[in-house]
Amino acid sequence: MPSNPQLNLMTNLLQLEGVTVINYQIIKEIGIVLSVEKIEPNATCIYCGSKTRKVHQNNELTIRDLPWGEKSVYLKINRRQMRCEHCQKKFTEELSYVPKKRTYTERFRKKIIEEVLNSDIKNVAKRNGVSEQEIETMLKDVGEDLNQEKPRELRRLGIDEIAVIKGQGNYYVVLVDLERGVIVGILEKRIEEEVLKYLEAWGEEVLTKIEEVSIDLWKPYKNIVNKLMPQAEVVADRFHVMKQVNEELDAQRKTLKREAKELKDTNQKEEILSGLNKSKYVLLKNEEDLNEEQKEKLEQVYKTSEVLSKMHQLKEEFRDIFETQSDWVSGLFELADWCQKAYSLYPKSCGTIRRWIGEIIAYFDQGTTQGIVEGINNKLKLIKRRAYGFRNFGNFQLRSFLTWHFTR
């Protein structure tokens, strides 16, 4: 029988709150087996909430725990069936560190899932001496828990989407806690009714505490926020506004290039195409970030097309408004001035600004962007590219939730 100092050492090494080691064995080919018991003799009745220490029956349970070095660790637990002294009902005491109806600790499951996220099920199973089916069960259990979990202390919400297959118009909706930088929801379809239903399930306790929602320029998102979160300020994401301007600039570049290809004057055609070829990047990238070679290319574009020259300058002026203005009044006047001089070249963008002016100028006070969401979307794209059944939404959703909640 181990001495008390040895048992105390084992208890300290185990670091499992609320339990003490009462015996241990080292078994060849198996590992370390620790017999443990709860320090607290009382149990709380699951029916009436009363404390009781009356044991109806003892049930020994062996569960898997974190390894110690290269050795596997198992815990032998006396999971007591109690009889409540108040209501006389029988119940099995809860073990906070063991998932319901499972034979491993919560922290062992967490370790396995973290390994799977950086490897694959087959290798993780082999490395840890568990079956692939056990790992599948772990993933399923945790995924269901995370999917049903409501956000806590959510004040700033970002709503965006990620293309399922680029160019086909199908999107997954991504909901993000902008303060913590974590996913709080993923929906399979960008349909107003589906998003509304998902958010409604959070309940008023969550929704009434949301102060601000950052969205792209899709009106149904605005409708949803106004209906479920009327107290929240809607902020149009500046990067989506900028995207509209860039798309209009690029559309003009494509038009000029297409027209140049139809010219009969060969010399004129080659001169214009030389200026426009490989010009997309230098036109759309922030001018201050261009290297010397790219700046020379931009100068060539300026000489080739007066229209693109003017549009590019206006694009940079537009971006500068969001970089320099810090209150909605000055932001409003700057945008109005920009639209007045840019309307002939950017009619679509000016129309968008007019329709969304309230949500756009909210940015100048709040400073909220979906830059963090864009980073998350890039990570989601990497998850999609991994062989994890990404064409199946359930698998993609599961891996996404696990990535954010188990690797931070």
Image (cartoon, rainbow, N blue to C red):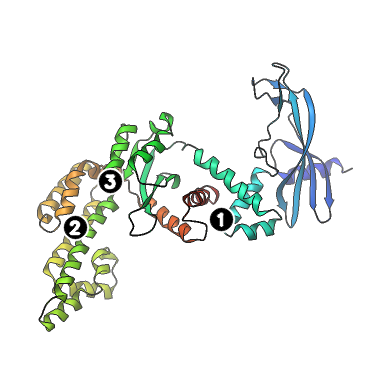
Examine the image and state in which quarter residue 379 appears: bottom left
Mark nearer the viewer, 2 or 1:
1
Whether 402 is drawn above or below 283: the answer is above
Mark nearer the viewer, 3 or 2:
3
The three-letter code of the residue at mark 1 reads Leu
Q: SS at mark 2? A: helix
Nearest the camera: 399 or 324? 399
> Which of marks 3 and 1 precedes in the sequence?
1
* Mark 2 to mark 1 CA distance (whole Å): 44 Å
The numbered dot on residue 117 is 1
* Mark 3 to mark 2 CA distance (whole Å): 25 Å
Q: In the rendering, at what x and y percent does residue 352 appear?
A: 19, 49
Residue pointed to by mark 3: 218
Marks 1 and 3 in Cβ contact (< 8 Å): no
Residue farthest toward the bottom in the current orientation of the protein: 267
Q: Is residue 229 visible?
A: no
Whether 101 is drawn above or below 274: the answer is above
The three-letter code of the residue at mark 2 reads Glu
Residue farthest toward the top in the current orientation of the protein: 86
> Which of marks 1 and 2 precedes in the sequence?
1
* Mark 1 to mark 3 CA distance (whole Å): 33 Å
The numbered dot on residue 317 is 2
Residue pictured at 21% horizontal, 57% vertical: 245
Residue pictured at 75% horizontal, 28% vertical: 81
Marks 2 and 1 in Cβ contact (< 8 Å): no
Q: In the rendering, at what x and y percent does residue 180 appear?
A: 44, 45
